[in-house]
Amino acid sequence: MVRKKKKAKPLNEARSRADHGTPEALKQADGVQYETVDGGRLGSVKRAYISRQTPMDRYRARGLVSQRQYDAAHAFYVLYDKTRQAGRVTSNYDRIIVDGGGSGSGINEYAFSDYIKLQQALGVDHVSVVRAVVVECESANSWAKRHRLPSRMGIERLRDGLDKLANVMGIS
């Protein structure tokens, strides 16, 4: 029995340009890095990615989150950044206080308590995904895979959490 030779499949063509912009815009953009796709062999295809763009920026540009949700995420990150500037959060037993040396203005300590209150208000279901995407710059898809959920569940939980965060923070 003679088998017919199968026709070669056509190459996949790119349907649309990536959301990095035109080649002219890429030349002028700040934070664009290139990496090789197939292990760095000579002449291999290189892909561009913007290293200074957070997942929330990408979700906003693609229309996956609303402006209200984006603003809530930004406010959450600003509050987290203030707590990070507070330095050590745990107690230090070998610290020697001389002449009553005050601990400063207390602004960062208030920010830390507000950050903890926000996390408690969000609840266990939403705080994990919001912190992973907004603070740790992890994608919602990879968060969902890490928690053994369907990949689409990550962005849905993120939206729910950001809506709840906007309600708690009074962002309209």
Image: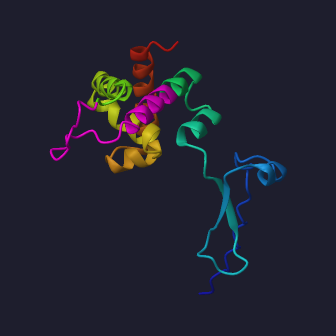
Q: Residue furthest front?
A: 99
Question: Image point 27% across, 25% down: which residue?
Answer: 120
**Where does the image place residue 92, in percent across and percent down from the top left?**
19, 43
Task: Judge whether residue 124 is colored magenta.
Answer: no
Rendering coords of residue 172 (x, y %): 52, 12
Q: Is residue 143 above or below residue 122?
A: below
Where residue 134 appears, x then y in whole percent?
46, 37
- Image quadrant where residue 167 sits: top left
Q: From the viewer's perspective, tell me whether residue 106 is left or right of residue 5.
A: left
Q: Which corner quadrant of the image does residue 42 belong to?
A: bottom right
Residue 109, relative to residue 12: is it above or below? above
In the image, is residue 95 part of the stretch drawn in magenta?
yes
Task: Write the residue at 37% across / 24% down.
Answer: 105
Query: How many numbered dots are placed on residues in this image?
Result: 0
List the single residue furthest toward the bottom.
1
Instruction: Tell me the residue at 32%/28% (across/down).
Output: 109
> Which x, y percent locates residue 159?
46, 28
Question: Which of the pair 28/103 is nearer the observer?
Answer: 103
> How did the renderer colour the structure?
rainbow
Residue range in magenta is 73-101
